[in-house]
Image (cartoon, rainbow, N blue to C red):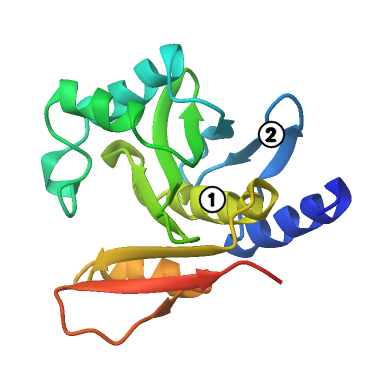
Amino acid sequence: MSESASNNRLHERTGSSGAEATRVRSEPTPSWAFTDAADREVHLDVVDRVAGEELDALAAMYDDYDRSHRAQGLPPVDPADVREWLTDLPGVHIAARHGDRTVGHAALVPDGEGGHELAIFVHQSYHDAGIGTQLLETLLAYAPAAGVERVWLTVERYNHAAVALYEKTGFVAEDTETPTLKMRLALAE
């Protein structure tokens, strides 16, 4: 996909929530910025490698992550487990930052079968401000440039806000009787 086509797709996808993320940097790694519903400037940055300072910033967010917001055993509770989980987590990552604080993280993790599993977390102090929506839309717009064609996720059925966001973004639920709902999205055009 050409840079122009990628930018057009990014603009298209990130503009659907009402708050538009504007690309502020293309090289060496892309970065976008937007103002959230609480009037905070938030930057979204592609994370090339979860190591060093990046690992410390993400781990700090997860170390302070409220246990009641954890789902399906993630993120881990123990700080050492958080660092190990982040270090071992391959794929495409985008971090949301407010000032020098990491406040959100989304990743597309290869599943070994040609798809990528979505994982997305926003620190509880930043909920209900549109950050999760921007993280998701920006990650999905960037994903094809990183070679991602199919995305899936599992979400607890009672998490109505998350299910609505995923449906709005184009995910389709599979018919299942389990407590968690599996949803899929094809990005290939």
Q: Residue furthest front?
A: 113
Q: Which residue is mark 2?
A: 30
Does residue 157 show up? no
Residue occupying image coordinates x 69% and y 34%: 30
Secondary structure of the residue carrying tag 1 is: helix
Q: Is residue 2 above or below residue 164?
A: above
Disc 1 marks which amino acid? Answer: Gln
Residue 70, given in percent of the width and then of the height, sits at 18, 47
Q: Nearer the viewer, residue 93 or 104?
A: 93
Using residue 96 as the reference point, say whether residue 12 is left or right of it. right
Q: Residue furthest top?
A: 52
Residue 43, given in percent of the width and then of the height, sits at 57, 32
Q: Which residue is mark 1?
A: 134
Q: Is residue 140 above or below residue 49?
A: below
First of labels 1, 2 by sequence position: 2
Residue occupying image coordinates x 44% and y 45%: 107
Residue occupying image coordinates x 57% and y 61%: 17
